[in-house]
């Protein structure tokens, strides 16, 4: 069965510093990986995905993610954090059996001014 | 472009009451999903529909039923609500193997 792990419940970073939100995955076959962001009282918004191609994927709002097959990781990154990036971030992997997405538990990002 | 629309946004039920959560998408997607979100547990799949006329159980289907009314609409029904079903419910749709698009959620409290 597919699964994703987000080992950090919360990440704190100062505005202007680089940020990393970690995700590791377990799949059989080729991984299809996704990052979503959730602002308070809102639905999930798509940030970026990896299906095939370059290991560095660029997405919305200046975010990027690095796919690392050997470490089975797909960490979300941004070179310079903004206070407005404070939100809940979810990593997800394609569930080939159910043709759905399986989500991690989420990581809350707090960017301090 | 409305995307995925869920109704209602908020609901309070008494234990044992029933209700239906409505979801509609206007993106002509084949696949639709119902997830529930609970603190510290991420999103868990309740039911999904890979295409019009088909529905299948996800991770946590007990206590729920679904109907794929047509390609646009996918409803979730709680026949006899329990406090354990207090949660935020999200509907989503998806084309092929791409990203899923989510509604704004329904915040349900069962007392």
Image (spheres, coloured by chain):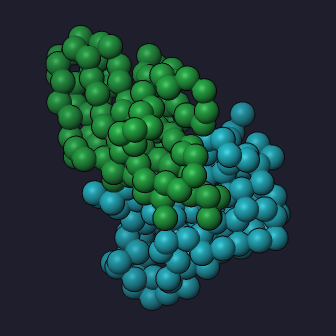
Chain colours: A green, B cyan
Q: Nearer the viewer, residue B29 or A99?
A: A99
Query: Is B29 in front, or is B96?
Result: B96
In x, y percent, where is residue A36?
46, 38
Q: Nearer the viewer, residue B70 or B48?
A: B48
Q: Is residue A103 above or below residue B108?
A: above
Q: Is residue A87 visible?
A: no
Q: Quadrant of the rendered structure where residue B6 is?
A: bottom right
Q: Is residue B43 above or below residue A58?
A: below
Q: Position of residue A27 (x, y in %)?
A: 49, 54
Question: Does B75 sit above or below residue A45?
Answer: below
Is A59 positioned to the left or the right of B49 in the image? Answer: left
Q: Residue at x 68, y 46 (%)?
A: B97
Find residue B111 and report its horizontal and vertical position in percent: 33, 78
Judge left or right: residue B76 versus residue A84.
Answer: right
Please say whether residue A24 is visible from this viewpoint: yes
How many discs mark residues in the rendered view? Answer: 0
Q: Residue at x 50, y 31 (%)?
A: A47
Q: Is residue B41 above or below residue B110?
A: above
Which residue is depicted at the point 49% across and 71% down?
B59
Which quadrant, please, contains the N terminus of chain B? top right
Residue at 40% of width from left, 38% of height from top? A70
Picture coordinates of residue A41, whole percent (x, y): 40, 45
């Amino acid at each position: 069965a597919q699964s994703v792990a987000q080992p950090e419940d919360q990440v704190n970073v100062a505005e202007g510093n680089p940020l990393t939100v970690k995700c590791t995955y377990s799949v059989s076959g080729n991984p299809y990986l996704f990052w979503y962001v959730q602002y308070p009282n809102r639905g999930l918004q798509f940030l970026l995905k990896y299906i095939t191609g370059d290991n560095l994927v660029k997405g919305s709002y200046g975010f990027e993610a690095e796919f690392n097959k050997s470490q089975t990781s797909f960490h979300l990154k941004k070179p310079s954090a903004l206070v407005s990036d404070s939100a809940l971030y979810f990593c997800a992997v394609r569930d080939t059996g159910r043709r759905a997405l399986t989500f991690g538990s989420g990581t809350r990002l707090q960017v301090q001014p | 472009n409305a995307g995925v629309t869920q109704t209602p946004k908020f609901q309070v039920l008494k234990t044992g009451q029933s209700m239906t959560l409505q979801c509609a998408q206007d993106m002509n997607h084949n696949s639709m999903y119902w997830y529930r979100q609970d603190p510290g547990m991420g999103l868990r799949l309740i039911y999904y529909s890979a295409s019009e006329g088909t529905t299948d159980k996800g991770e946590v289907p007990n206590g729920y039923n679904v109907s794929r009314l047509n390609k646009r609409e996918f409803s979730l029904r709680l026949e006899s609500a329990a406090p354990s079903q207090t949660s935020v419910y999200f509907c989503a749709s998806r084309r092929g193997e791409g990203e899923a698009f989510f509604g704004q959620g329904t915040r349900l409290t069962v007392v």
